[in-house]
Amino acid sequence: MKSAKSRVNDLRKLVEGTGLKLLDCSISGGTHYRLVLERSDGEQTIFFASLSPSDRRAALNNRALMRRFANGTTTFKEQR
């Protein structure tokens, strides 16, 4: 299993590869990373990723969601 530092580096590379800026990375509730992301137009969102990289499909889904946000094709606005 990867160390926490290695996992954070993997997440940082994933975020940078999508063209987003990582503003903050913290642990939320002990089971997920809480990432504050910003795209080029200044819009920010909070994104959650699992602490463990055990699910390859989840990593690919996370990348797809980040790319959609970076491209402006989706927003993660809170729906009421």
Image: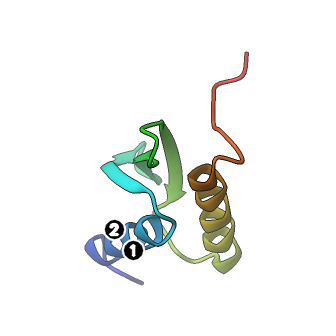
| Mark found first going from the N terminus, 1 or 2 | 2
Instruction: Using the image, determine if residue 26 lies above or below residue 4.
Output: above
At 40% from the left and 76% from the top, the residue drawn is 10
Q: CB of mark 1 within 8 Å of CB of mark 2?
A: no
In the figure, residue 62 lies in which quadrant?
Answer: bottom right
Return the mark for residue 8: 2
At 52% from the left and 49% from the top, the residue drawn is 48
Counting the numbered discs, the total is: 2
Q: Nearer the viewer, residue 26 or 1?
A: 26
Q: Secondary structure at mark 1?
A: helix
- Which quarter of the rendering shows the C terminus? top right
Q: Secondary structure at mark 2?
A: helix
Return the mark for residue 13: 1
- Which quarter of the rendering shows the N terminus? bottom left
Q: Within 10 Å of the Cα at label 1, are there few (<14), some (14-19), or many (20+) other Cα atoms?
A: few
In the figure, residue 60 lies in which quadrant?
Answer: bottom right
Q: Within 10 Å of the Cα at label 2, are there few (<14), some (14-19), or many (20+) other Cα atoms?
A: some
- How far across and how far down the image is residue 15, in percent? 45, 64
At 56% from the left and 54% from the top, the residue drawn is 70
Q: Amino acid at mark 1?
A: Lys
Q: How is the image coloured?
A: rainbow
